[in-house]
Image (cartoon, helix red, strand yellow):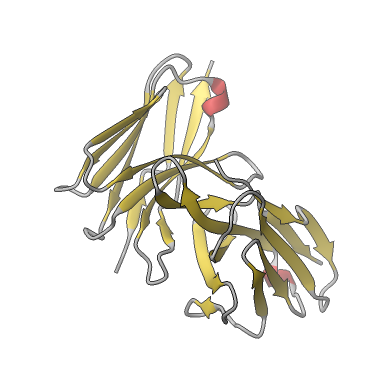
């Protein structure tokens, strides 16, 4: 079945780059997403990428997609303390067109 | 991006009562809305999918008589937790699928979530 895997924790220093990795299993997924969740809050869509793209950049965020390896990554340049949150990778693949989420990567940014 | 609201943001109730949670898409029409449940430090689990004007489709293991979903209009879906018990305590998040104008891609936008605590 469909499955999305992420590492659970990442710790970086302020100003460094953060790279959050994700693997998925459904090769027919057309869209892949990154969401950010701050404590006690809902999910904020950060960015998404079409499956026919290799890279997408949006300000400090860069998404890389390796479709052959079913690997997705999110790079945050110049990471700030305000970037501390849980980041969820998701693929659109459910029978209802719903999103399948990874368990989330908790990003901690140290000053 | 599009805005989805949820109400209430937090509710505490006694065991046996029913709780209604509203999900609204504020600036777009959502033909499909999704209801997710999130346990502490865990990912989101899809509970059900609702399409405007039709019955909701529930995921395996989710009791449809326990979690009543009504999608009465293109901007409103409600989830009612009937006869709530402490094990129903959780963070409930809705999302609405709308059209991303710039990319012409339908994207899911999430509400801020509702924290339900059943005593």
State the quadrant of the C terminus of chain A: top right
Left or right placement of residue B96 versus residue B86 in this view: left
Q: Quadrant of residue A37?
A: top right
- Which residue is rendered at x = 74% and y = 79% of the image? B82
Task: Report the front residue among B96 and A43.
Answer: B96
Is any part of residue B76 visible from this angle? yes
Task: Report the front residue among B115 and B7.
Answer: B7
- The percent position of residue B32, horizontal first and vertical second, equals 53, 66
- Which residue is rendered at x = 50% and y = 63% of the image? B45
Left or right placement of residue A32 versus residue B108 in this view: left
- The percent position of residue B64, horizontal first and vertical second, equals 60, 83
Task: Report the front residue among B52 and A102.
Answer: B52
- Which residue is rendered at x = 28% and y = 57% of the image? A29
Q: Is residue A20 above or below residue B83?
A: above
Q: Quadrant of residue B85?
A: bottom right
State the quadrant of the N terminus of chain A: bottom left
- Which residue is rendered at x = 59% and y = 54% of the image? B40
**Residue at the far bottom in the pictured view:** B65
- The percent position of residue B56, horizontal first and vertical second, equals 56, 78
- The percent position of residue B110, horizontal first and vertical second, equals 57, 51
Q: Quadrant of residue B25?
A: bottom right
Left or right placement of residue B35 versus residue A51 in this view: right
Q: Is residue B66 above or below residue B31?
A: below
Q: Is residue A23 above or below residue B55?
A: above
């Amino acid at each position: 079945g469909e499955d999305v895997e992420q590492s659970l924790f990442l710790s970086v220093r302020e100003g460094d780059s953060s790279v959050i990795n994700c693997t998925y299993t459904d090769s027919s997924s057309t869209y892949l997403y990154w969401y950010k969740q701050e404590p006690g809050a809902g999910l904020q869509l950060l960015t998404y990428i079409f499956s026919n793209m290799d890279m997408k950049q949006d300000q400090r965020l860069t998404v890389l997609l390796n479709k052959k390896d079913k690997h997705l990554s999110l790079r945050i340049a110049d990471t700030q303390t305000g970037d501390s949150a849980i980041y969820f990778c998701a693929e659109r693949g459910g029978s209802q067109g719903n999103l399948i989420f990874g368990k989330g990567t908790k990003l901690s940014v140290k000053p | 991006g599009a805005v989805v609201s949820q109400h209430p943001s937090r509710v505490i109730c006694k065991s046996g009562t029913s709780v209604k949670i509203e999900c609204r898409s504020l600036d777009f029409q959502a033909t499909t809305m999704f209801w997710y449940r999130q346990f502490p430090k865990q990912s989101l689990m899809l509970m059900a999918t609702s399409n405007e004007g039709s019955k909701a489709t529930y995921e395996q293991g989710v009791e449809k008589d326990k979690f009543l979903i009504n999608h009465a209009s293109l901007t409103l879906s409600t989830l009612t937790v009937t006869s709530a018990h402490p094990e129903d305590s959780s963070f409930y998040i809705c999302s609405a699928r709308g059209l991303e104008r710039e990319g012409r891609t339908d994207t899911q936008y999430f509400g801020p979530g509702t924290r339900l605590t059943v005593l």
